[in-house]
Image: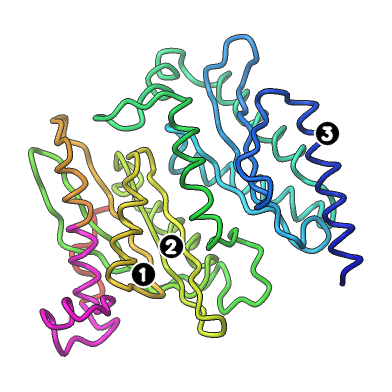
Amino acid sequence: MADTEEENLQSQIDEIEALSSIYGDDWCVIDEAARIFCIKVSDSTDDPKWIICLQVILPPEYPISAPPLYQLNAPWLRGQDRTILSDSLEELYLQNIGENILYLWVEKVREFLVEKSQTSDAADQGTSLKSTTEENYVDDDHEILLGAELSYDLFQNSIVSGYMNDSEATKEDIPTIEHGEPISDRRSTFQAHLAHVVNPLQVKAVLNKLYENKKIAAAAHNIYAYRIHSKKTNTFIQDCEDDGETAAGKRLLHLMQILDARDVMVVVSRWYGGILLGPDRFKHINNCARNILVEHNYTNTMEESARHPGKNKHTAKENKKRPDK
């Protein structure tokens, strides 16, 4: 065991040295002791139009018996684009199990960006790159910094979809998805969706199922967070996604932590109505999430239990307010 760990560590050191030499200033060490790194990848070195920050954590088992944990940070990377790229990275790992994978991942991200640059309208490129939401401008450097600040907390409790060996479900095991009451304000509409999940494979399955609904897929943002409780270790697997609404995912996850919500995923869709809502949009996102968590009895705090006694978990109307297809 000790020999394997030492071999992994030496392999990681060699890989990091090579990547640092190849990518120069684009390679960043966030926390060397925790083995957290990031690299800024673009479609062009001279005139970049599309940029992604790929953040990774290298677990002690990597590369021999485990993949890196990763996060893709970009203000415009949402929905189908994120799914396609994540699937590509996971497929690359599965094709190269036991080998150093980071260089292949970086070049796959670059290939994705080059292809997007070649097939997208130039005007749309400028808009997509510069807007994280309809209401909040965040430039690329700030977005990368924001991701770096979030990475340690999120990665500590994250497991990449598709690498679960001790899984209680498969990709085909899609949990029932509940739909909450919409909240409307100044022509914007917010609606929460909830599913009981026991591992990240189901999280991905729920997202894919939701995106089959054209109305949900067309939403300006689909913010989500999930918390999965491991009874064996009494720890949580948890993660969140802003989907372009900066910091909304982290706020949603924080709400779920306060409510001690377990084994559940919440997605909040926002359809933008053309009028800026300012901070009110975060209030609506959290209110939607809180309402659906309370309705389905996923709140374990004394405060919420006192407000809604006697509710049974997973016993709400299955097709309530389902978005039109």
Residue pictured at 17% horizontal, 51% vertical: 284
Kindly identify the residue that appears in the image at 44 percent across and 43 percent down. 79
Q: Which residues are magenta?
A: 287-316
Q: Is residue 313 magenta?
A: yes
Crowd band around label 2 with a 10 angstrom C-alpha radius: few (<14), some (14–19), many (20+): many
Q: Which mark is residue 195?
A: 1
The picture places residue 213, in percent across and down from the top left corner, at 35, 53
> In front of the other: label 1 or label 3?
3
Q: Is residue 221 magenta?
A: no
> Which image quadrant is residue 63 in?
bottom right
**How many C-alpha atoms fall within 10 Å of the one at disc 3: few (<14), some, or many (≥20)?**
few
Q: Left or right: where does residue 286 sit relative to residue 203?
A: left
State the residue lying farthest toward the front. 33
Instruction: From this view, report whether residue 250 is shown above or below residue 279.
Output: below
What residue do we see at 34% from left, 39% from top? 246
Q: Residue furthest bottom?
A: 310
The numbered mark, 2 or 3, whose residue comes first in the sequence reads 3
